[in-house]
Amino acid sequence: MSVFASLVEHLADLLQPLFGTFAAAAAIVLFTAFVRLLLHPLSRAAARGQKARAALQPRIAELRRRHGRDPEKLQRAVLELHAREKVSPLSGCLPGLLQLPAFFLLYHLFSSGTIGGRANELLGHRLFAAPLGGRWTDALGDGGLFGGPGLVYAGLFAVVAVVALFGYRLSRRTMAAQAATAGPGEQVPGLGAVTRVMPFLSFFTLVTVAVVPLAAALYVVTSTTWSLVERAALYR
């Protein structure tokens, strides 16, 4: 944790001439972009996987005609086809799962009063009037909804709401395109329920931003925005 704290502090020092008092917040945004850039090859692989699954539709349709009266046999045949072609229905989840450690590092870093036996100086950094170690409930207690910290969160919520709305629409279009060519036999167990819920997950970001430290909220907002732009580019 102390190594990670030093990394954020050094990055903030480098950005100080450009961003002034917002250097630590800018360092978090830059760190998030770096993490997402590292994961971009996996995102591209997930996009290729989706295209590969689309290419399997004629063969899956043939399996459906052959085993339509035996759902269990059809399910087994479809899973074997995916395994044989090395296409994973869940490959798109990897980028999201692999960035969780970075999020939790930021969460713990800005939730700890001390790092390596000394005071955590990062907690003194702010984004405008809101401390990076504070939460929305703290902002409500320090001036209310329209106080300085409250307005910072209002701006974040507005950004998240816009990103979530576009993410919802993009997910719905993707799910509709898949449903147009898919049949009930070609999904892995439980995947149908996941895909129905997936479009609404974008709005869960609003809850996350409200309950985590502001530094972690910046990570979430930056990463979610990156994901939306990336998906729009890769799945067009």
Image (cartoon, rainbow, N blue to C red):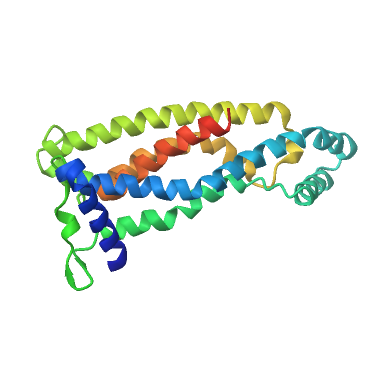
Q: Residue at x 24, y 46 (%)?
A: 25
Percent from the top left, x then y, of residue 16? 18, 47
Q: Residue at x 13, y 41 (%)?
A: 129
Which quadrant of the structure image shows residue 139? top left
User: In which quadrant will I find the C terminus?
Assistant: top right
Q: Residue at x 42, y 50 (%)?
A: 35
| For residue 123, above or below residue 197 | below
Percent from the top left, x then y, of residue 135? 22, 48
Q: Is 98 placed left or right of 58 in the picture?
A: left
Percent from the top left, x then y, of residue 137? 20, 45
Q: Is 194 placed left or right of 21 in the picture?
A: right
Q: Nearer the viewer, residue 98 or 185?
A: 98
Percent from the top left, x then y, of residue 191? 63, 43
Tally of numbered tags: 0
| For residue 179, above or below residue 45 | above
Residue furthest left as drawn: 143
Residue furthest right as drawn: 66
Q: Is 20 placed left or right of 219 in the picture?
A: left
Which quadrant of the structure image shows residue 182? top right
User: In which quadrant will I find the N terminus?
Assistant: bottom left
Q: Is residue 1 visible?
A: no
| For residue 183, above or below residue 223 | above
Q: Is residue 66 visible?
A: yes
Q: Residue at x 27, y 56 (%)?
A: 8
